[in-house]
Image (tube, grey):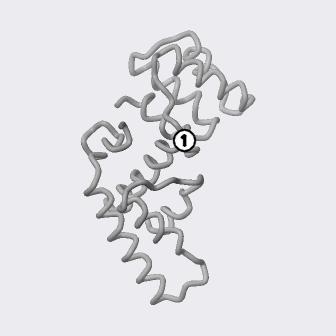
Amino acid sequence: MDRLEHSAWQYVAEVLSPEELPMLAAHALVDGRDSPALRELAGLPRRSDETEIRELYVQALHELGVPLPDEEAAGRWLLVSLAVGLAKAELSPKDVVDRLSMMVAARTPEETQFLSIAADYSEWMGADELLEWENGLRTAAHSLTASTDLGSGTGVPGSLRD
């Protein structure tokens, strides 16, 4: 999966802000992707009109044959990618909670367990309770990552491509 295909998942999962899209387009051009909308998007300043940026981004994806995933699949991808980040110690448990920015539907027991534990976070937890929650979330993250093929280079869990 190349940078542009990966961005489509991030875009639908609402973790890719519009101001990042012009630079993403510039990188895609450097990577060898090319379309009229992609060139136009790459030339826009970061602070351009969000609607124009979004429209050009979606148009560029269409011109390049890159499909946008549906919201459920993108939400599940987000959930798995957060679990991978936590399992690899690239994210903290609090980072995971902060990045769950959209309603995520869980379809597998591992997704459900991870999401359920993440949802139990409270800033009012005591130190012991917080440590127990963090350990539970890490354990659930490892279970979730073991149940997917996210690390296979595709960047998309096989169960999400069905």
User: Dividing the picture into quarters, in which one does residue 99 lie?
Assistant: bottom right
Q: Position of residue 33 (x, y in %)?
A: 43, 16
Image: 136 above or below 8: below
Q: Residue at x 60, y 78 (%)?
A: 123
Q: Residue at x 45, y 49 (%)?
A: 76
Rendered-image quadrant of the N terminus: top left
* Lateral position of residue 151 relative to residue 95, left or right: left
* Between 162 and 34, the one nearer to me in the picture: 162
Q: Residue at x 53, y 53 (%)?
A: 104
Place of residue 66 in the rendered image (x, y in percent of width and height, measured from the top left): 46, 23
Quarter of the image for the C terminus: give it. Answer: top left
In this rendering, the answer to whether 97 lies above or below 42 is below
Which residue sits furthest top?
Answer: 36
The location of residue 124, given as percent across then percent down, is 61, 83
Please tell me whether mark 1 sits on a helix, a strand or a loop: helix
Q: Is residue 120 above or below residue 39?
A: below
Q: Which residue is mark 1?
A: 71
Name the side, left or right, on which 126 lies relative to 3: right
Q: For this view, does 58 lie left or right of residue 89?
A: right
Q: What residue is shown at x 36% (from left), y 69% (from top)? A: 138
Q: Amino acid at mark 1?
A: Glu
Image-quadrant location for residue 4:
top left
Q: Nearer the viewer, residue 113 or 40?
A: 113
